[in-house]
Image (tube, grey):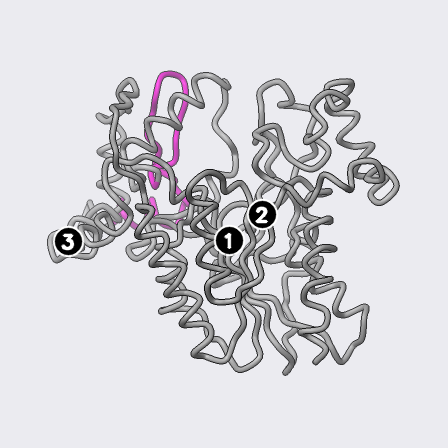
């Protein structure tokens, strides 16, 4: 009775268990990450001197490892380089009752009977670092609505930071309902290539085995989490050498091929959006896309021609980022489009992506 009462108190009080490392506290869901990925994040936090506030936006999930919390609204102010810690604009993550990211100002989504634009991707397609309205998928929806009310398009974005093509395949099988004429933007690769002790598929199988499920549900009890946090703290990160990746190159090729094939069989059309995807994984993505006649958008390469006129196209955003970076922006010109990690698009990058993708989709949507 005592433990049941304590569990209820933890639950209704909104208690969030955490695990500690030095002076830092990490949300307990991060234990679901591969130990090598967690160790790398520990090293990043120790170097930067802060834990990104957006990591508190997620909850553990049996199928996917973690997902966005439902009924959430959190403003993120520390999320990038320590050098620009207090200079970059804050951004907001809000979600509905199902854990889908929504607008903080207008959380109710009105759907019509027209086509749906489905987005399967990672943090860049999620809109990491920018408000919901500034993400390229939402800007695309706005452009089609302006073009003609009759050509309005629903947007369903299933992207989640850290997701790989393995997650995309799971989402397509379990959650994404595609009807004839729908468009699916696919964007994976960067996270697939990350080194890990075990692949995403192996971790999924272990988590969803009988023993894994029992362990999972026991660990969901807040009282157990609380007791563990009293005695458990993260050790110094140890990053061993490994040839394993979250998704092997062969697995990546197979996943993309399966996603494209499934979308086509359901009457949809895929487009591949390459963001922060380099090396062999980018090459494989382009090869698979071209082999099945899938349009391939290579960002941020497409950004370069816009550099001379970006301050005219996005004057307010350009001033914001120039104020943050100062003269550094003159030398590191990619900061006009990307955050300091030179991977995630900023608000200008998302705006340019929306413009470029819109040109490729305009005829497809109107036909």
Say which element carries label 2: strand
Percent x, y of residue 104: 65, 53
| Mark with earlier residue (2, 1) | 2
Say which element carries label 1: strand
Gap between marks 1 and 3, in whole Å? Answer: 33 Å
Q: How crowded is mark 1: few (under 14 residues within 10 Å), some or many (20 or more)?
A: many
Gap between marks 2 and 3, in whole Å? Answer: 32 Å
Q: Which of 90 and 5 is in front in this view?
A: 90
Q: Which of 67 and 140 is in front in this view?
A: 140
- Asked if the residue under mark 3 is in contact with the one under mark 1, i.e. CB atoms within 8 Å, the reply is no
Percent x, y of residue 125: 56, 51
On the image, which quarter does residue 314 sit in? top right
Residue 219 placement, left or right of 332: left
User: Which residue occupies the extreme right position in the image?
Assistant: 312
Gap between marks 2 and 1, in whole Å? Answer: 20 Å
| Mark with earlier residue (2, 3) | 2
Magenta segment range?
5-29
Residue with the mark numbered 1? 187
Q: How crowded is mark 3: few (under 14 residues within 10 Å), some or many (20 or more)?
A: few
Picture residue at 44% right of the left edge, 58% below the top: 288
**Above/below status of 358 relative to 162:** below
Q: Nearer the viewer, residue 150 or 255?
A: 255
Quarter of the picture containing the C terminus is: bottom right
Percent x, y of residue 161: 47, 45
Residue 214's label in the rendered image is 3
Residue 93's label in the rendered image is 2
Picture residue at 46% right of the left edge, 46% below the top: 283
């Amino acid at each position: 009775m005592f433990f049941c009462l304590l569990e209820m108190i933890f639950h209704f009080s909104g208690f969030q268990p955490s695990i500690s490392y030095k002076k830092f506290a990490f949300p307990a869901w991060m234990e679901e990450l591969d130990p090598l990925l967690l160790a790398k994040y520990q090293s990043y936090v120790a170097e930067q001197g802060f834990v990104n506030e957006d990591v508190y936006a997620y909850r553990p999930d049996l199928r996917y490892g973690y997902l966005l919390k439902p009924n959430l609204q959190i403003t993120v102010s520390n999320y990038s380089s320590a050098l620009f810690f207090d200079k970059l604009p804050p951004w907001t993550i809000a979600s509905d009752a199902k854990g889908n990211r929504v607008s903080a100002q207008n959380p109710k989504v009105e759907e019509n009977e027209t086509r749906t634009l489905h987005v399967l991707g990672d943090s860049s397609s999620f809109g990491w670092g920018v408000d919901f309205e500034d993400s390229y998928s939402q800007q695309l929806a706005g452009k089609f609505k302006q073009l003609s009310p009759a050509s309005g398009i629903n947007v369903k974005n299933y992207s989640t930071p850290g997701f790989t093509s393995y997650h995309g395949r799971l989402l397509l099988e379990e959650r994404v309902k595609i009807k004839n004429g729908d468009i699916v933007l696919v964007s994976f690769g960067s996270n697939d290539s990350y080194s890990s002790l075990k692949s995403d598929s192996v971790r999924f199988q272990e988590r969803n085995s009988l023993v894994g499920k029992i362990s999972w549900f026991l660990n969901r009890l807040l009282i157990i989490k609380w007791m563990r946090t009293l005695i458990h703290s993260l050790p110094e990160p140890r990053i061993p050498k490994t040839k394993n990746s979250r998704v092997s190159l062969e697995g990546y090729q197979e996943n993309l091929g399966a996603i494209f094939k499934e979308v086509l069989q359901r009457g949809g059309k895929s487009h591949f959006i390459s963001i922060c995807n380099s090396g062999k994984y980018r090459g494989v993505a382009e090869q698979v896309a071209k082999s099945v006649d899938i349009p391939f958008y290579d960002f941020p390469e497409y950004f370069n021609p816009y550099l001379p006129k970006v301050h005219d196209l996005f004057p307010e955003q350009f001033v914001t980022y120039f104020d943050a970076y100062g003269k550094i922006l003159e030398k590191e010109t990619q900061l006009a489009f990307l955050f300091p990690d030179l991977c995630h698009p900023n608000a200008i990058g998302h705006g340019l992506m929306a413009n470029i993708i819109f040109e490729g989709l305009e005829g497809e949507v109107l036909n």
